[in-house]
């Protein structure tokens, strides 16, 4: 298991991931960080947990828009095979992962 350090809202977090997936995690974290930064600019510093929850909701909204428009989400072929049900499961899984990360952050 590999680990990468990401910075979101000025805080460093060590994230575990599969070996070889480090850059992917860094890319995703960069996107999340940019969304958190946008929210912080609009609302100010309202706390890490709240900023991350709002960012998660915005990102989930983007996923739902992609699903509703019938556009192919990232991972194209997989979405073709599984259709909306698989996309829905992927969104649920992502939401669960985001909740777990937020819980870990609140404990530290």
Image (cartoon, rainbow, N blue to C red):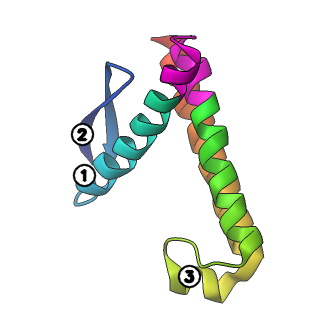
Give the mark nearer the N terminus: 2 vs 3. Answer: 2
The secondary structure type at the circle numbered 3 is helix
Whether residue 90 sits left or right of residue 85 in the image: it is left
Along the viewing direction, whichever of 39 and 85 lies nearer the viewer:
39
**How far is the residue under mark 2 from the one under mark 3?**
27 Å
Image coordinates for residue 10, horizontal then vertical, percent: 32, 19
- Front residue of this view, candidates 101 and 47: 47
User: Chief secondary structure of the magenta span?
Assistant: helix
Residue 2 magenta: no
Give the residue number, with chain letter if any, for mark 2. 4
First-in-chain label (1 vs 2)? 2
Characterize the local packing of mark 2: few (<14), some (14-19) or many (20 or more) Cα atoms within 10 angstroms: some
Q: Where are the magenta residues, as a range?
A: 39-53
The crowd level at tag 1 (other Cα within 10 Å; few <14, some 14-19, many 20+) is some
Percent from the top left, x then y, of residue 29? 37, 42
Query: Quick check: marks 1 and 2 in contact, CB under 8 Å?
Result: yes
Which residue shows up at 33% across the image and 41% down it? Answer: 16
Numbered label attached to residue 22:
1
């Amino acid at each position: 298991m590999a680990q990468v350090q990401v910075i979101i809202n000025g805080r460093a977090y060590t994230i575990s991931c599969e070996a070889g997936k480090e850059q992917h995690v860094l890319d995703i974290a960069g996107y999340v960080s940019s969304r958190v930064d946008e929210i912080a600019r609009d609302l100010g510093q309202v706390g890490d947990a709240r900023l991350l929850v709002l960012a998660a909701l915005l990102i989930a909204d983007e996923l739902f828009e992609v699903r509703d428009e019938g556009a192919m989400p990232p991972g194209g072929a997989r979405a073709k095979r599984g259709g909306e049900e698989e996309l829905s499961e992927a969104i649920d899984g992502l939401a669960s992962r985001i909740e777990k990360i937020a819980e870990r952050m609140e404990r530290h």
